[in-house]
């Protein structure tokens, strides 16, 4: 069974600080990795894809470690608006079918003024 | 583009009633999905479709049915609603299996 594990938090972080959290996945054949953001009582929205070489989008940096089977998300200069739940999403190679997307339960981040 | 739209936004059902949750996407995506999300829990896949006329079960299909007569629409049918089906239901779509999924705003369902 494919699993995606995240620390549920909450992470309480002062505004302006840097915060990082990891996610581990169990399916070594996984090919696609994403971070989604979910605000309270809203739908999940794509934050960024995670590429093998790592990628950066403004204050957000995502990295993939295939050997240890984890991905990470780093947020620099955190803003109050970054408060949300961050979902780690792994799309495994199930060999057919569209049920390969596995969502973590999310890490709850609270940015405090 | 409106993206993925869902109706209704909220609904309260009595035990044993039935209803259909509507989902429509205007991105010409082949793949569509239904998830449920319980409080403090992750998303669980109920059903998915890889194209018009093709549907398949996900992780938690019991108590639900789907159909996919067109590329745009993917309704979810609840028969004989039970309190265990109280949840938030999200519809999503993607162009390819491995690609980003786009979610609708969700339907909050309470079964009393």
Image (cartoon, rainbow, N blue to C red):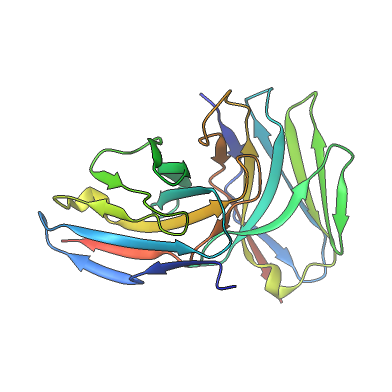
Q: Which residue is most to the left?
A: B16
Q: Residue B20 in the image: x percent, y percent?
A: 26, 59
Position of residue B27 relative to residue B100, above or below, is below
The answer to whether one can see residue A112 in this image is no
Observer-nearest of B35 and B52: B52
In the rendered structure, the answer to whether residue A33 lies left or right of residue B75 reads right
The answer to whether one can see residue A27 in this image is yes
In the rendered view of the protein, which quadrant contains the C terminus of chain B?
bottom left
The image quarter in which residue A64 lies:
top right
In the rendered view of the protein, which quadrant contains the N terminus of chain B?
bottom right
Position of residue A24 relative to residue A56, above or below, is above
Q: Residue A101 in the image: x percent, y percent?
A: 57, 39
In the rendered structure, the answer to whether residue A109 lies left or right of residue B14 reads right
The image quarter in which residue B90 lies:
bottom left
Position of residue B75 relative to residue A29, above or below, is below
Name the residue at 25% across, 62% down. Answer: B110
Q: Residue A59 in the image: x percent, y percent?
A: 85, 63
């Amino acid at each position: 069974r494919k699993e995606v594990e995240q620390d549920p938090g909450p992470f309480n972080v002062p505004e302006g600080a840097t915060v990082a959290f990891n996610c581990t996945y169990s399916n070594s054949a996984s090919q696609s990795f994403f971070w989604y953001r979910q605000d309270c009582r809203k739908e999940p929205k794509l934050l960024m894809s995670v590429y093998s070489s790592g990628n950066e989008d403004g204050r957000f940096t995502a990295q993939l470690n295939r050997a240890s089977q984890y991905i990470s998300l780093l947020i620099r200069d955190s803003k109050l608006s970054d408060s949300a739940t961050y979902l780690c999403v792994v799309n495994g190679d199930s060999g057919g079918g569209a049920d390969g997307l596995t969502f973590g339960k999310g890490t709850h981040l609270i940015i405090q003024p | 583009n409106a993206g993925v739209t869902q109706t209704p936004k909220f609904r309260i059902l009595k035990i044993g009633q039935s209803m259909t949750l509507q989902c429509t996407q205007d991105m010409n995506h082949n793949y569509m999905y239904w998830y449920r999300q319980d409080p403090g829990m992750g998303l669980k896949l109920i059903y998915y479709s890889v194209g018009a006329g093709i549907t398949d079960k996900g992780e938690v299909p019991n108590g639900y049915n789907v159909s996919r007569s067109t590329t745009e629409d993917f309704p979810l049918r609840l028969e004989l609603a039970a309190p265990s089906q109280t949840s938030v239901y999200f519809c999503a779509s993607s162009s390819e299996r491995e690609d980003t999924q786009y979610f609708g705003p969700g339907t909050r369902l309470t079964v009393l």
